[in-house]
Amino acid sequence: MRIAVIGAGALGGTFATLLTRAGHEVTVTARGAGLAAIRADGIRLRGGFGEAHARPAVLERLVERPELTLVCTKAQDAEAAIGENAVMINGSPVIVVQNGLDGVQTAKRLLPHSECFGALSIIAANYTEPGQVTVTTAAPTYLGRGDGPIDQETRRWQRVLNEAVPTRAIENFIGAQWTKLIVNMLNALPAITGLSVQQVIAHPGLRRVMTASMREAVRVGAGRNVRFGALQSLSNRSLRVFARLPLWAGQILPLRMRRRMGAVPNRGSTLQSITRGQRTEIDFLNGAIVREATAAGLPAPINTLLTALVHEVERSGAFLTPAAVLTRADVLLHAE
Ligand SMILES: NC(=O)C1=CN([C@@H]2O[C@H](COP(=O)(O)OP(=O)(O)OC[C@H]3O[C@@H](n4cnc5c(N)ncnc54)[C@H](OP(=O)(O)O)[C@@H]3O)[C@@H](O)[C@H]2O)C=CC1
Ligand SMILES: CC(C)(CO)C(=O)C(=O)O
């Protein structure tokens, strides 16, 4: 099948390489150093899914209509990246592989003639340099659309993706996007401190802040009447119970997430943007919680602080020490 992958970074590079290995005819779009590196030597994948080297076609923009397109940019780049390729992809199916709440809606708005789906990936992948990706956790990807049951088209594309990476079709995709947003409360503190996700969770003070951000996010979702979708071991019921536990007991959730992640350091996709000197996705992660809280008339002080701290680090290029983070967060934790 002719498959296009827009944005060949950590996840795009993983999907492009493994779809090529599965026998598909893959074209990726890239720019700058990524374009030059992939043109010269293809994409090299290491880690959790084994070693693979793919030589997909690489272009700045698509010039042919693919049979399926995966959009794998960060959320802040999705509108531009889809817009640049809209002439070619509008009318053919599109899967947006993205964190945050907005990706599928953005694709639907820009591609009114396409069937649009979303993929929530639990894979952890590190874009170590242009054209090089290391998978630090090999985990499933969840595919769906809307808030209803799984439809036939979703099952069809699930089977195609599943040839490359373990993929499951899910009902209530919109609720599952929220559940993934709770998981993505893992991202901010590594981006602020420069530590891996596992190191942040191992730090008792930072773990409390992370747990508080997750609880706040669940409460905001509940305030927006969200029915959280099932993802890994998380469910609507378990998340709502988690948000009511005392803070000390709630820390079981990030500890469980760390256990599932394994021991290979996971830098998280937001820290990777910081390290590359790029704008992060934080306004679509913790920032989305702040916006949703405003809409629900609820406070979201922890997510407001974490969003602001990531922006501080983006501007200064200097990570904060755990002690500096705790000085800023302590008063909020006492009020929790
Ligand atoms: N990495 C991970 O482990 C996980 C990531 N995710 C989510 O998946 C999504 C993708 O993340 P990730 O793969 O980490 O991101 P990366 O930043 O590694 O990759 C995104 C790629 O998109 C490229 N890009 C941006 N705009 C364009 C454009 N207009 N045309 C062509 N290419 C473009 C970027 O190029 P350039 O480098 O030139 O900017 C970059 O190579 C995010 O929403 C993230 O949150 C979800 C689960 C895990
Ligand atoms: C789940 C996690 C944290 C995996 O790294 C992720 O989604 C990300 O890095 O954006």
Image: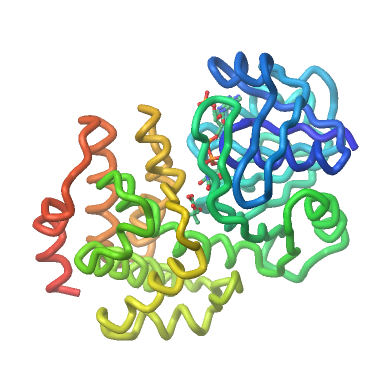
Q: Nearer the viewer, residue 97 or 161?
A: 161
Q: In the figure, 149 relative to 320: above or below?
A: below
Would you say 139 lies left or right of 283 here?
right
Q: Residue at x 27, y 84 (%)?
A: 246
Would you say 281 lies left or right of 78 here?
left
Would you say 228 lies left or right of 332 here?
right
Identify the image quadrant of the N terminus: top right
Residue 152's spot in the image, x, y percent? 88, 62
Q: Nearer the viewer, residue 220 or 98?
A: 98
Question: How many numbered discs sit on the rendered protein?
Answer: 0
Which color scheme does this rendered protein use?
rainbow
On the image, which quarter does residue 85 sit in? Answer: top right
Q: Nearer the viewer, residue 135 or 282?
A: 135
Q: Give ligand 1's quarter of the image.
A: top right
Q: In the figure, 37 relative to 121: above or below?
A: above
Q: Residue at x 44, y 51 (%)?
A: 266
Q: In the figure, 307 relative to 298: above or below?
A: above
On the image, which quarter does residue 107 sit in? Answer: top right
Residue 10's spot in the image, x, y percent? 57, 38
Would you say 195 lies left or right of 5 here?
left
Residue 257's spot in the image, x, y percent? 46, 68
Q: Residue at x 20, y 74 (%)?
A: 336
Q: Residue at x 79, y 25 (%)?
A: 88
Residue 256's spot in the image, x, y percent? 44, 74
On the image, which quarter does residue 130 sit in? Answer: top right
